[in-house]
Image: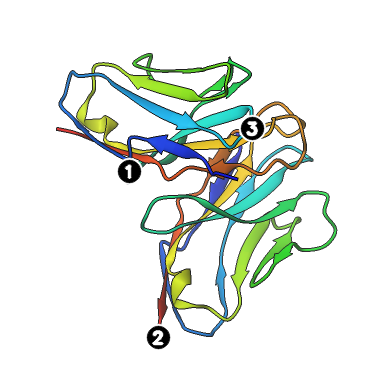
């Protein structure tokens, strides 16, 4: 069965510094997709970045980048130049049943990031 | 383009009652998924619908049911509410389910409190 593990329940970072949020995954599939979502206190899940298992380059979206190490089965999120508005819960997720069977996402337990001024 | 809307945003019910939550996906999206989020269990998949057909169902009791209408709007129903049903219920929409990369857009959620 597929599983996502986020081992950091909470993290602090100083404003303008970079921070790495860890995510490891377990799957027997060769093809899969990994996602990172941000959830502010308002509750809405905001899509940040996506990495496909066959993508040769690490994904980047503005200040977000994904450090994808396939052999280690890790997909860490890197936020550069942290801002106060980055304070939120961050979830790593994997799409189950790659190949068009479903949109179902399996989520990790999340990391609560607090950005300090 | 309007995002995913969920109504109501907040709901308070008592044990034994039933509740219906609504989700309107982004215009043109035909796939809707539901998730339950609790502090203890985290985010758990409830159901997935596409073109009025349930494609996938999570490991929840039969008290949880859902449906999708021809306009892609979806509802989920929880009968005989229990205290443990208190949660944030999130709806996500996407265009389809067969593409390798398919971004899902989430709504703001409905926060259900069962007393």
Q: Residue at x 67, y 41 (%)?
A: A27
Question: What distance separates the C-alpha of mark 2 from that of mark 3?
Answer: 40 Å
Q: Secondary structure at mark 3?
A: loop
Its colouring scheme is rainbow
Q: Residue at x 73, y 34 (%)?
A: A98
Binning the other alpha carbons within 10 Å of mark 1 as few (below 14), some (14 to 19) or many (20 upward) gives: few
Kindly identify which residue carries mark 2. Answer: A117
Question: Foreground residue, A95 or B104?
Answer: B104
Residue A107 position (above or below residue B31): below
Q: Seen in the image, is A19 located left or right of residue A41?
A: right
Q: Which chain does tag 1 point to?
A: B
Q: Nearer the viewer, mark 2 or mark 1?
A: 2
Question: What distance separates the C-alpha of mark 2 from that of mark 1?
Answer: 31 Å
Q: Nearer the viewer, mark 2 or mark 3?
A: 3
Question: Foreground residue, A90 or B103?
Answer: B103
Kindly identify which residue carries mark 1. Answer: B40
Question: Foreground residue, A79 or A108?
Answer: A79
Query: In the rendered picture of this protein, how many numbered marks are placed on residues?
Result: 3
Q: Seen in the image, is A26 located left or right of residue B78?
A: right
Q: Quadrant where the C terminus of chain A lies?
A: bottom left
Q: Which chain does tag 3 point to?
A: B
Kindly identify which residue carries mark 3. Answer: B29
Q: Secondary structure at mark 1?
A: loop
Q: Position of residue B87 (x, y in %)?
A: 31, 38
State which tag comes first along the sequence, 1 or 3. 3
Q: Position of residue B5 (x, y in %)?
A: 46, 39
- The quarter of the displayed image where residue B12 is located: top left
Binning the other alpha carbons within 10 Å of mark 3 as few (below 14), some (14 to 19) or many (20 upward) gives: many
Q: Are marks 1 and 3 on the same chain?
A: yes
Q: Nearer the viewer, mark 1 or mark 3?
A: 3
């Amino acid at each position: 069965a597929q599983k996502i593990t986020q081992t950091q329940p909470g993290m602090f970072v100083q404003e303008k510094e970079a921070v790495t949020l860890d995510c490891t995954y377990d799957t027997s599939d060769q093809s899969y997709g990994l996602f990172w979502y941000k959830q502010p206190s308002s509750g809405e899940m905001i899509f940040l970045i996506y990495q496909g298992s066959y993508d040769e380059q690490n994904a980047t979206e503005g200040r977000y980048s994904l450090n994808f190490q396939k052999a280690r089965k890790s997909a860490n999120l890197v936020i550069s130049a942290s801002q106060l508005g980055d304070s939120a819960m961050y979830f790593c997720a994997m799409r189950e049943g790659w190949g068009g069977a479903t949109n179902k996402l399996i989520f990790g337990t999340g990391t609560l990031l607090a950005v300090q001024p | 383009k309007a995002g995913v809307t969920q109504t109501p945003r907040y709901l308070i019910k008592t044990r034994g009652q039933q509740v219906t939550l609504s989700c309107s996906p982004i215009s043109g999206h035909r796939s809707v998924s539901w998730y339950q989020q609790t502090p203890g269990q985290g985010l758990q998949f409830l159901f997935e619908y596409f073109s009025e057909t349930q494609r996938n169902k999570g490991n929840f009791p039969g008290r949880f049911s859902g449906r999708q209408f021809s306009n892609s709007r979806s509802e989920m129903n929880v009968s005989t509410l229990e205290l443990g049903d208190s949660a944030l219920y999130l709806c996500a929409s996407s265009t389809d389910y067969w593409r390798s990369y398919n971004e899902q857009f989430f709504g703001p959620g409905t926060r259900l409190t069962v007393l």
